[in-house]
Image (cartoon, coloured by chain):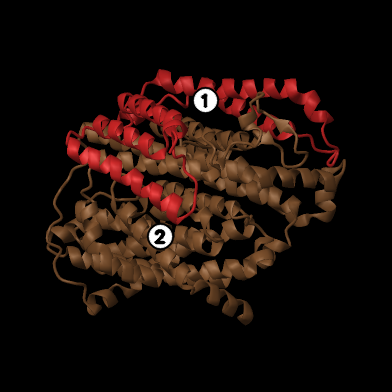
Chain colours: A red, B brown
Amino acid sequence: MTAGSTSLLAWGQFITGVAIVVALLFDQEKLNSTGQAFAAYKPWVFPLFCAMGLILIGGFELVTKTHVNPAKYDKPNVYSYRAGVGTFAIMLIFAASFEILGFVVSSFIAMTLLSVFAGARNWFQIFIFASLLPTLLYVLMVYIMGVSLPAGLDL
Amino acid sequence: MLDLLLASAELAIRVDVLVYTAGGLLLGMCVGAIPGLTTTAAMAILLPLSFFVEPIIGIPFLIGVYKGGIYGGSISAILISTPGTGASVATTFDGPHLVRQGKGRKALDMALYASVVGDFTSDCITIILIGPIAALALLLGPPELVPIILIALLIVIMVSSSSISRALAMALIGLLLASVGRDPIEFSSRLTFGLEQLEQGIPMLPMLVGLFAVPEIIRMIGASKLNRLVHRTVVDTGSRLTLKEFLNCARTIARSTMIGTVLGMIPGIGQPVAAFTGYAAAKRASKDPDSFGKGALEGIAAAEASNNAVNGPTLVPMLTLGIPGDKITALLMGAFIAHGLRPGPELFEEHGTLIMAMLLSMLFANILLLGVAKLFIPIISRLVKLSPSILAPMVLVLAFMGAYLYRSDPNDLYFLVAFGFLGIITKRFDYDVTPLVLGFIVAEPLEYAIGQTLSLAGPDLGSYLLGQRPVALTLFIILLTLLLWLILRKYIARSSTRLRI
């Protein structure tokens, strides 16, 4: 991790805070007009204070450069970008196919992809594991615990 | 009181409650023993399973996962020198040495007995103390709750593993995330940006699963790619622990239990700190301190008794004030809320029998742990060798299933992915998510208490506090002192160093 990426995070905090303040200011009139139960309290006050706090901390980190401490990040990195990008791509495919293909099929696909991505090459083991676990979970949840999980296309 | 205890005991010793608790213990032990899977992630994944049964079954099941997980962490810490959880880091100082000396079985036995004794004793203390604390908590009104919640948040920020400013930023992000959707007083919609999916607010469970489970999956993938998870064979574990060896450590176990119990009641301290403190105290008090770190059974006893003694007392601030002290109690609080039991001062008044039954089931869980661990240690010892290429896909499917089961809403899966992304960013850049989770959970009661306080006080808050709420005023003064200390402590430390020079 570089000092640049940490200052990006400090900027991120600062900008998020500003964006929320702006959003609340736009909504202020609407929020003021709703409900009169607690006249002394307005719904925009609490998030506004939190957002202002975030702006202050982001600003403080940028000004004092307390976020810049490259020596601290010399530790080995297991949260690599490659592992992250690959896993998130698989998770998005899983989320998108969850209802369409159903729990068992989408889980099979996601598990196979992730196993291969993690370096497994024993196809028989991958196939058995990726088909057995989702099927067992589906049976356990739907037929034993009576919970609904998506069955997928015409199942 | 006796009637309450009897009625609660009747609930707690139901066969189904005991079976689920034992199941939770076994699952927790498996998870704790697998390096790369944390108890927190397992709790997050298994949380939805508890929703489909009565609270008296679901909550003890999760408590079982919690207790089993903390103990399970010691198995891999002893056998392969890899702590399964942060709580068992101190166990790695002596465990692997004992394994190399052919005393692995003794180390595992000592870890189990010290864990059970420490946990059981601290649970008894919790049960004795929780009633009076709950009665005191009932005297607190909204004006007192505001500074109490803020003080707890501040303590968690102060003991956070990341810097103060980062922990503070995370707490604020948690409070802001909880502000999305309907506000707790006027029920007006805010910060939804016109998105219908945000009207009900951010769902807690997909958020927790994303924050805790997704970084674990990516860590496992990253580690497997870098070949960092070393697979070693479990060596010959040797002979069992003798009664004499156990009794030799009795004083250490008693001391560590007290340390863990006291530290457990302070929000944010958690098992790792208790384990290190217990270990250091045992070393200081030992007749043979040089043996520590080279294979001392006393070292295992100290670390395990103190980290397990934290389990019960962490529930005290959560149950009585509605303030979770760490990630795991935050998850447990999520389970309580999902079951319609909002932890706080009124919880004992409204659901006294049920809560006492849950506390008693914690005691029974310790006895069950003894049996479950004795039966399954040989099998669980093999799990420490499980490959991440099998583990990561398994966790992924369980995480997605758990997030979906919460509301049967496919949109929650996208929340999971989004919070997974946030989780990985926080891990990568050393931001601690505990203040975020705590902020998210306490935001609603905090905002509600602020609204009520302002309404009660009228136009002059200062005179209201001064004239009618002296306890609240004192708490606000403590809060301000803590804040000032937090801001000025660096300067004070710097000036005192200069004076010494």
Q: Position of residue B167 (x, y in %)?
A: 51, 37
Which residue is rendered at x = 46% and y = 41% of the image? B209
What chain is tagged by disc 1?
A: A
**Label 2 neighbourhood size at 10 Å, few (<14), some (14-19), many (20+)?**
many
Say which quarter of the image contains residue B395.
top left
The answer to whether marks 2 and 1 sit on the same chain is no
Q: Position of residue B206 (x, y in %)?
A: 50, 39
**Furthest-right residue in this view:** B459
Q: Position of residue A53 (x, y in %)?
A: 63, 30
What chain is tagged by disc 2?
A: B
Instruction: State the residue in front, B111 or B342.
Output: B342
Residue A61: mark in rendering: 1
Q: Amino acid at mark 2?
A: Gly
Instruction: State the residue in front, B442 or B352.
Output: B352
Q: Is residue B60 above or below residue A43?
A: below
B131 sits left or right of B222 in the view: right
**Labelled pair 2, 1 in contact (Cβ < 8 Å):** no
**Furthest-front residue in this view:** A154
Say which quarter of the image contains residue B204.
top right
Which residue is rendered at x = 25% and y = 54% of the image? B76
Residue B95: mark in rendering: none
Q: Nearer the viewer, mark 2 or mark 1?
A: 2
Say which quarter of the image contains residue B436.
top right
Q: Please name the residue that numbered disc 2 is placed on.
A: B24
Using the numbered discs, state the Cα–Cα distance from disc 2 to disc 1 in whole angstroms.
Answer: 43 Å
